[in-house]
Image (cartoon, grey):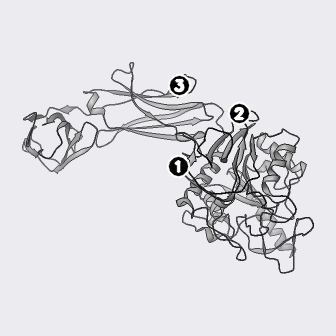
Amino acid sequence: MKRIFTLGIFIFLLSILTSKAQIKILFDATKAETAGNADWVIDAKNHNLAYSGTTGLPYVSTGTTKQSNPAILPSPDQSTVTSSTAETYWEGALSNWAIDCVIKGYHVETLPPVTGKITYGDNTNLQDLSKYDIFVVDEPNIKFTLAESNAIVNFVKNGGGLYLISDHMNSDRNNDGWDSPMIWRDLTNNNTVQKNPFGITIDSTDISGTFSNKITSATDSLLHGPMGSPTQVKWSAGATMTIDKTANPSVKGVFFNTSNTSGNTGVLCAYARYGKGKVVAMSDSSPFEDGTGNPSTTLYNGYTGDVAGQHRLLIMNATIWLATKAAGVPLEFIDFTATLNNQNNTLLNWTVNQSGDDIDNFEVQFSGNGETFSTCSNVSLYNNEGTVNYYYTDNKIANYHNAGVVYYRIASNFKNGSVKYSKVVSVHPPKRTEMTVYPNPAKNKLMIHVEPFTQSAALIVMSTEGKVVYEQNMNECSGSLIIPVMNFTNGNYFIKLQKADGSSYTAAFIKN
């Protein structure tokens, strides 16, 4: 038995060393997260936990209790998880979320019941919060001690990410007199670091419904993050929240239970910065539940089963936002390239480090001389934090440049009116050969004349809006072509014949 215990400790210590460079997420299980009909853990092979009828505290039981008792590390080992691993690989109602985190490249652990301790700055605790990037607490049912509250607030203040999850009023699953809204309010109001540090208060409410009331923002990290753009949430007996911008000016509501998305009440999902860290708060535990876990518990699939899987997008966007460390400067251009593809469109790619909410958008700008630039298009922010790649395809290069060199740069527009520019890059479009079209305007047929060639080519006709209305592939051309235009809508058109050697012919005509 001693040998097995030593091996287990060795494996745990090895996991700490090997995951040092990874984002490390600690899921709390010390606050009765498996009491009653809850199973808010990522994996539990043992179901031998009970909760005291007097204190509500957990203990290992030899009786008939069947509550989940999770270990520190999920099993099978997370190193064996692949992009196709099913959420049933682990046995907990949060396993789908945890699997997604591991697929993203993160390391997950559980702070176990009975033996786990919530501390910050305690070097004797192998699972001290200082060793982790994100701390997840899903519907706590045991009140935090003052020391634990201070530890959590200081963890965030010094750069940690807190995922704060609540449930509805009267959701006291271990019958100790405390439900999760009360517990979260006690932590934010009664810690000795700062009162209401996050500007978020869980209300004593109980609401259900599907809600699509969200803020209007093309750049919000939770609504438009790497996982996608959620548009709805479903609360199945959850609470609302109130945000206080006086207590924390950075706090932002994302989803609301009313159409007043500019207000401070009726908030369902919110996030904020505090000190060097971040907080995401959601006031219902149902969206995190994946439908499987403790076989003696009735579970539902809110993670992917409700609102067409949009909870998953929101939850993972929020997790990624918490995991993304601020770059230290509002924006830094890392790289910018421009290349021509086979269709002679310009492919632009720029990489930046960005942080904060100061950036408004990007402008793609072009020039014929490298000095005087005009705007080609605006590009919205993809994510507000960290290293981000942006892409844009300029398919109008043939329309506003005749030949020679085309120059590009990216302008980053800040909300205060200032602008930061990337370096200037250039491309050299292939020289275009003259094409003659007649009659012009054309009614039924269009005659095309070019120099004869013997190679493959593609003929494309586009409207002025860029819509392709006619395509033809050929292997050679004697010098003349005829295409039917009788079914074209009257208006202006561009015609392009792209040869395999990179040269091309372009012209414009009118259909009437």
Spatial CA span between label 1 and label 3: 28 Å
Q: Residue at x 81, y 60 (%)?
A: 141
Residue position marked by numbered label 3 in the rendering:
420
Corner quadrant of residue 393: top left
Question: Of discs 1 and 3, which sits in the foreground?
Answer: 1
Neighbourhood count class around disc 1 (C-alpha, 10 Å): few under 14, some 14–19, many 20 upward: some
Q: Position of residue 260 (x, y in %)?
A: 61, 41
Q: Earlier in the sequence, mark 2 or mark 1?
A: 1
156 is higher (above) or lower (below) than 238:
above
**In front: 80, or 217?**
217
**In front: 507, or 458?**
507
Please state if 374 lies on the left or on the right of 44 as rendered: left
85 is higher (above) or lower (below) than 189:
below
**In front: 206, or 127?**
206
Q: Position of residue 221 (x, y in %)?
A: 59, 43
Q: Earlier in the sequence, mark 1 or mark 3?
A: 1
**Res. 237 in view:** yes
Q: Position of residue 372 (x, y in %)?
A: 38, 19
Q: Amino acid at mark 1?
A: Ser
Residue position marked by numbered label 2 in the rendering:
249
Residue position marked by numbered label 1 in the rendering:
229
Q: Are marks 1 and 3 in contact (CB under 8 Å)?
A: no
Please state if 429 lies on the left or on the right of 508 as rendered: right
Corner quadrant of residue 45: bottom right
Q: Amino acid at mark 2?
A: Pro
Quadrant housing the C terminus: top left
SS for dot 1:
loop
Neighbourhood count class around disc 2 (C-alpha, 10 Å): few under 14, some 14–19, many 20 upward: some
Corner quadrant of residue 138: bottom right
Please state if 270 lies on the left or on the right of 373 as rendered: right
